[in-house]
Image (cartoon, rainbow, N blue to C red):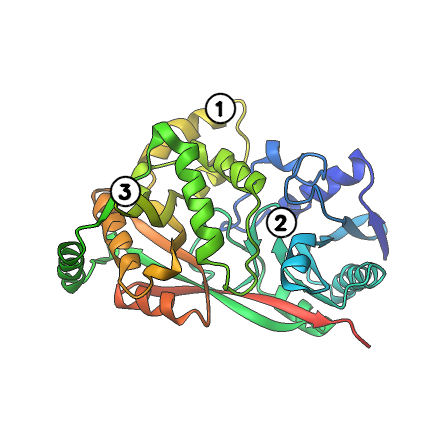
Amino acid sequence: MKLVHVTNRKTMKAFVNFPRELYRNDPYWVPPMWGEERHAYDGKTNVMLRDNDYLLLLVYDQENLLGRSLVYIDASFNQYYKASTGFFGAFECVENQEAANLLLSTSTQWLQERGMTAMRGPIHPVAESWGFLLKGYESKPVLMASYNPPYYHDLMESFGLTKIKDLLAYEADISAGYQVPERIGRFTQQLLKRHPEFSVRRIDRKNLMTDAEHIWKITNIALSDNWGYVPVDELVMKDLVRRLKVILDADAIWFVQDKGVPIGYALGFPDPNLIIHAIKGKLFPTGFLHLLFRKKHIRRYRLFGLGVLPQYHGLGLDVLLYKNLYDALIKKEFLLEANYILEDNWKIRNALEKLDLVRTKEYRVYEMSMVE
């Protein structure tokens, strides 16, 4: 076996296209949008890689490509947590422990040479997905969520990586009989009656960037104590808006306000993965038409984020936001997946379970110490 660094067009093409071959017989795998993916790993244009050291790796057996991985140092993470942790992501590999070991050992060596004392992953800075899927293979993946063969966990553990955190997904499916409990409707009515200063509204399409900044600022305060969270840079926020703007649905994004000032939000979006799967990740020559005309009929949604400023915790504003989201989308007979939920985030887990959402998926993030 040999390891190859991605340094030119040929090796970059091999890196980008490897998952296409690996998952060719997997009906659940959703390809990336290939037009964007071909340029996604360039530090000159990718806001997640621009200011960080990173390395793209390929492993071959003779001329047969067996795997790939991205290893990187997130300077913002290490500065925020006063840590020396390196990361890996974009990991894909055939079921071959020797190939996986070569990718992972090269990654740890590269990180150690740069002063890192631990390696964590997978955290994919391009796809913005965390962990390897552990449970829930019967439910198709939503946009920006992990999907992988089950044997990846054996590859990680055999190398010496161990669990550091599990992330969960919950689901509400109208077609399967899901309904918000009646008590939730009574609670939200009483809440607004007791607190007339509170109001709820949809996102304002005409002032999209202003509302996106509200979400950005609330997120960086509300989630600051969450495990692994790093304050989001403004450029990253704007890049996410650019990527999600094409599938924006105002019914899926709600604000709660105190005297007209946003203090919390629920951020959902229609999941385009079924369309992306159908067009095989290609917008041209006709894929963009499928996306344009079929996105109005999407019934599967992802609840991507929910945040309320800390001084308003305990009032039930998260439930108020969810109830408005539910009421706006019920006409579409939606299936809503909420992820990633930290396994020890009991406030959010309890809220979702009180809303009768069902836990459907688990993802696992691994870490290993590199201190001898």
Residue at coordinates 67% horizontally, 34% vertically from top-left?
45
The C terminus: image quadrant: bottom right
**Looking at numbered disc 2 in the image, what kind of residue is underneath it?**
Pro
* Residue at mark 3 to residue at mark 2: CA–CA distance: 35 Å
Give the residue at mark 1: 286
Residue at figure coordinates x 43%, y 24% from the top left:
289
Identify the residue under disc 3: 260
Q: Residue flagged by tag 1: what amino acid is it?
A: Thr
The location of residue 43, given as percent across then percent down, is: 72, 39
Image marks 1 and 2: residues in contact by CB distance under 8 Å: no
Disc assigned to residue 181: none
Q: Is residue 370 left or right of residue 278?
A: right
Query: Who is closer to the viewer here, 66 or 319?
Result: 319
- The residue to which callout 2 is attached is 125
Q: Is residue 190 left or right of residue 319?
A: left
Left or right: where does residue 159 sit relative to residue 151?
Answer: right
Q: Quadrant of the N terminus?
A: bottom right
Give whichever of discs 1 and 3 has the lower sequence position: 3
- Residue 62 falls left or right of residue 177: right
User: Badge 3 local density, few (<14 within 10 Å), some, or many (20+)?
Assistant: few
x and y, in percent, of residue 85 in the image: 70, 63
Asked which secondary structure carries label 3, the reply is loop
Q: CA distance from mark 1 to mark 3?
A: 43 Å
Amino acid of disc 3? Gly
Helix, strand, or loop for circle 2? loop
Numbered disc 1: secondary structure: loop
- Please identify the quarter of the rendering in which residue 163 is found: bottom right
Q: Nearer the viewer, mark 1 or mark 3?
A: 3
